[in-house]
Amino acid sequence: MVADAINENAHVSTYFPDTNILISFGRDQTIAKKLDKAVASGSSFVLAPATIEELARGVINGGAKHFQNDQRAFRWLREYNWPVLELPIPFIGDVLSSPARQGRVIPDHYVQLMDMIAQSAEVIQTRPKPVLRFRN
């Protein structure tokens, strides 16, 4: 687990957190302290689009009961403005210098999604799915 690898003797690194680490960040102070310590030591993070999608779905599906804890992870991610990786297919197309299916989703859209969750006031329980309500 990424958080277990971060200790006092760790050198400055770039980490690729998975969804479970980010969920734990909001719900477990020990994990939050380890990640904050890594950042204070100069380490950084990069984010995968799939991780952001999975985390965002979890926030919505978790509803009001877990919203504030789950929202902490998004606020932390946005506080440090960690970069979001390109989507896999366009990235591979660039690497191979071949035409790849270009979607309309770009990394900035994931940043917007994280901002939306980080700045939301609450999750409103509605049927069939909960929705985010924004601060006025």
Image (cartoon, grey):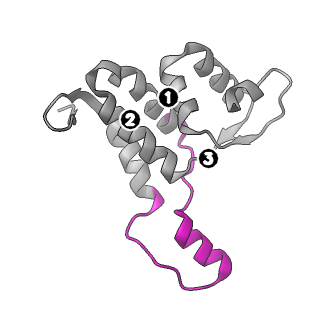
Q: CA distance from mark 2 to mark 1?
A: 9 Å
Residue for point 25% across, 27% down: 121
Q: CA distance from mark 3 to mark 1?
A: 16 Å
Q: Which residue is mark 1?
A: 23
Q: Which one is in front in this view, the residue at disc 3 or the one at disc 1?
A: 1
Residue for point 49% across, 51% down: 50
Residue 58, disc:
2
Q: Which residues are magenta?
A: 79-107
Q: Which residue is mark 3?
A: 46
Secondary-structure class at tag 3: loop
**Is mark 2 in CB contact (under 8 Å) with mark 1?**
yes
Number of numbered tags placed on the structure image: 3
Residue 136: percent from left, percent from top: 17, 32
Residue 103: percent from left, percent from top: 41, 72
Instruction: Identify the amino acid type marked 1.
Output: Ile
Residue 104: percent from left, percent from top: 37, 69
